[in-house]
Image (spheres, rainbow, N blue to C red):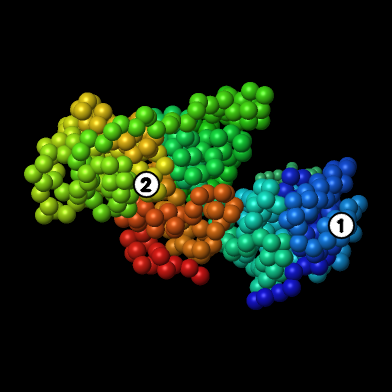
Amino acid sequence: MSAAPARLLGVVGAGTIGSGIAQLAAQSGARTLVFDVAEGAAERAVERARAGIAKLAAKDRFDGDPDEAAARLQVVGALEDLADCELVIEAIPERLELKHELFERLSALAPRAVLASNTSSLPITTIARAATDTSRVVGMHFFNPPPLMALVEVVAGVDTSEEALALARATGEAMGRRVIDAADGPGFLVNRCNRPFGLEALRLLQERIADVETIDAIVRAAGFPMGPFELQDLVGIDVGFEVSRSFYEQSFGEPRWRPSPLSARMIAAGRLGRKTGRGWYRYEHGRIVRPPDPQPAAAAEPKGLVVISGFLPVADELRERAAEAGWEVDEHSGAEVPWLILECGPRDPDAPPLQGAPRALLCAEGPLHALDPGGSSAGFHALSPIGMVELTRTADTSAPAAERTEAFFASLGLPTVWVGDAPGLVLGRIVAQLVNECAFALTEGVGGAQDIDAGMVLGLNHPRGPLEWADLVGLDHIVMILDGLREEYGEERYRAAPLLRRIPAFHEHDH
Ligand code: NAD
């Protein structure tokens, strides 16, 4: 159903998010009335919104007349002043009793208005209970800071009417946001699909596969603007932990969503992140203290023949890069003894065995100790397109295998880092669980495939959405890692969503 955007819009709660929403509302052409209970807060929010508009105009990035847009913003002194609004968006603190009181009053004061909540974690259906007409309550979830994050999730509660949804969508679009539909469940669409980003990183840390700085560096090298631990510090470890608890409780104990005891320990120590000057990192004068990211070692010269087996995209990329770097590359062993053999996942069972040279195995369908029990191979893992290569070893890994593996990747100009042994190592495990979560969300009808990818990119600045990841790295690579994790840990947390085994269905899944 298409609808016109709201022309008279109220914003209640003019803090961090409310002021950004007010700016977008004025930009969309709506007269925007801003209310806050705290003395002077609405005035400051309107000032910030006008400054935001002026900044865009100064950069020539404002469509229309900036003065007119600024003039559309108005502070109001009482909720009663919102009586004629078509749409009221609330961004007051995340406490159910506050939202209930507000929705009850707005129901009486503005009987025709659609009431939108910007809640991140409270169910829209629960908030709506306090409204006289629950069909007019909808979720409009903006991302921080709204003027920079081009996304809004529109969330339907159990009773939300098509009219209310259409008004919310049209208004979001008039604000220049990409509007995606999300079901009313924990984290809606985007925050739900992103659960593994933090939680899998915490598991990797708990198992001491890698330390905080290394995990973050690996994730940044894959194109994410921030590592999971820097992000937790920014959000507040206490805030993130509460979100995790709420997911776990709302799902009655989904193992993928179990909060980490490491977060609880940080909270007990008062290390809450940036705001306390200490979290996973130390902060000096507001700046993060961390080591420089690993760089490629001085490039070694190619030493002749390298055998790179396997059909996964990462194998194709390695063969291509090796040839470009001057290696002689083959997929199979021949008469000549290679300098190094890289086995990238399962091989044709009829092909002759790869042996006679030091080997490195891609740790996807299992950890190195299971892929080469008691053997001398080194392990590695990367996803295509390769940013950094993770290396691993067991007590039996031979020095030549470890040294040659490291030297080979250096010859391709790729940075390497040593981590502990596990299926998918660090990045593979995080990305596999991101894709898995997205597949569960699709199955459960939480949102559409294209909306998930757009949401992760526009709402969270991921380099690409989970479906695009799956396309690039190969869905079979993702399933190998998940099955490897399930086998290794025996935990339901790593069960692969059944949709992932129905490849065409996964690709075609959408509303
Ligand atoms: P904030 O604390 O910065 O702002 C809240 C504002 O609401 C304050 O100015 C406060 O004075 C005002 N307020 C409190 N009670 C009020 C009432 N009864 N009536 C009118 N005004 C009232 O909070 P925020 O970070 O902007 O978050 C607001 C909402 O947005 C929350 O529901 C939060 O979950 C959600 N949200 C926040 C973010 C984020 O990153 N900050 C992102 C998405 C959604």
Give the number of marks. 2
Helix, strand or loop status at disc 2: loop
Left or right of residue 407: residue 31? right
Question: CA–CA distance between discs 1 and 2?
Answer: 49 Å
Residue under label 1, please give it: 67
Residue furthest bottom as drawn: 1
Disc 2 Cβ-to-ligand 1 distance below 8 Å: no
Question: How many residues crowd mark 2 within 10 Å: few (<14), some (14–19), many (20+)?
Answer: many
Coordinates of residue 138 in the picture (x, y in percent): 68, 63
Q: Residue 233's quadrant in the figure?
A: top right
In front of the other: 389 or 414: 414
Coordinates of residue 447 in the picture (x, y in percent): 53, 63
Q: Quadrant of the N terminus?
A: bottom right
Left or right of residue 350: residue 407? right
Residue furthest left as drawn: 335
Residue under label 2, please give it: 383
Q: Earlier in the sequence, mark 1 or mark 2?
A: 1
Image vertical order of residue 149 relative to residue 177, above or below: above
The residue shown at (11%, 46%) is 334
Helix, strand or loop status at disc 1: helix
Question: As shown in the figure, which amino acid type bears the numbered disc 2?
Answer: Leu
Question: How many residues crowd mark 1 within 10 Å: few (<14), some (14–19), many (20+)?
Answer: few
The residue shown at (63%, 30%) is 274
Residues at discs 1 and 2 in contact (Cβ within 8 Å): no
Question: As shown in the figure, which amino acid type bears the numbered disc 1?
Answer: Asp
Coordinates of residue 239 in the picture (x, y in percent): 61, 38
Q: Is residue 319 visible?
A: yes
In front of the other: 451 or 40: 451
Q: Residue 343's quadrant in the figure?
A: top left
Coordinates of residue 370 in the picture (x, y in percent): 22, 39
